Amino acid sequence: KIMKDQLLNVFSPKCINTAVKSILKVLDLNEIDLVFLDYEKPSKFVSSANDCHLNVWVQCNHEGGGAISGWIIGEDPKQRFIEAQFHTVWCSPDGKLQDITPRTDGEKTIMFFPDPTRRISFFEHDGNAAICTYNSVKMLNQVLISKIEKMNIISTSDFAINHGFYTPK
């Protein structure tokens, strides 16, 4: 991740600070909804690092429960950069939230804010599963540089292929 020729070092903040409050205001979320979640490996399949929405779908099919969408907050305080990445976690049948998506950056605990107003949705596109989701929201020096926008994605990962979400042509 490069911005202004600077390498970003983005990790979940350990507490709610001014930058977190700023991005929560943009997202119209409340700081009291904060949940810190550790990665928890699913017991019946190997989850994919970049397929949170599909991981949760597969987990629900194996274990029941539901999907909770929201935002992972990541910050590089030295560069005065903060972002919110749309993310889905699993809610077990007993109501426990679990992050079942491994992180490519090796981070073990995420700062997660559930978002009751925005949800992913699945639809069929050209015989494959497509996901309506949201882009990442980014701020630099307390200024919004990437606003919330809906986007449609089709995962072509090995995970998507192996679980029947995508069929290569």
Image (cartoon, grey):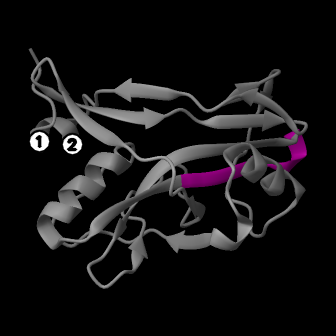
Please identify the quarter of the rendering in which residue 46 is found: bottom left
Query: Could you tell me the amino acid type at mark 2?
Result: Phe
Q: Is residue 12 left or right of residue 159?
A: right
Residue extent of the magenta highlight: 71-79
Look at the image and say whether residue 109 sits in the magenta stretch: no
**Percent x, y of residue 139:** 78, 36
Residue 25 in view here: yes
Q: Residue furthest front?
A: 117
- Cβ–Cβ under 8 Å for marks 1 and 2: yes
Name the residue carrying label 1: 162
State the mark number for residue 54.
none
Q: Secondary structure at mark 1?
A: helix
> Residue 159's mark?
2
**Element at badge 2?**
helix
Image side of residue 80 versus residue 36, left or right: right
Q: Residue at x 87, y 42 (%)?
A: 80
Residue at (78, 69) in percent of width and height: 15
Q: Position of residue 158 (x, y in %)?
A: 20, 36
- Vertical side of 157 occupied by 13: above or below: below
Badge 1 amino acid: Asn
95, above or below 39, in the image:
below
Q: Is residue 30 left or right of residue 67?
A: right
Q: Which residue is more in the foreground, 84 or 44?
A: 84
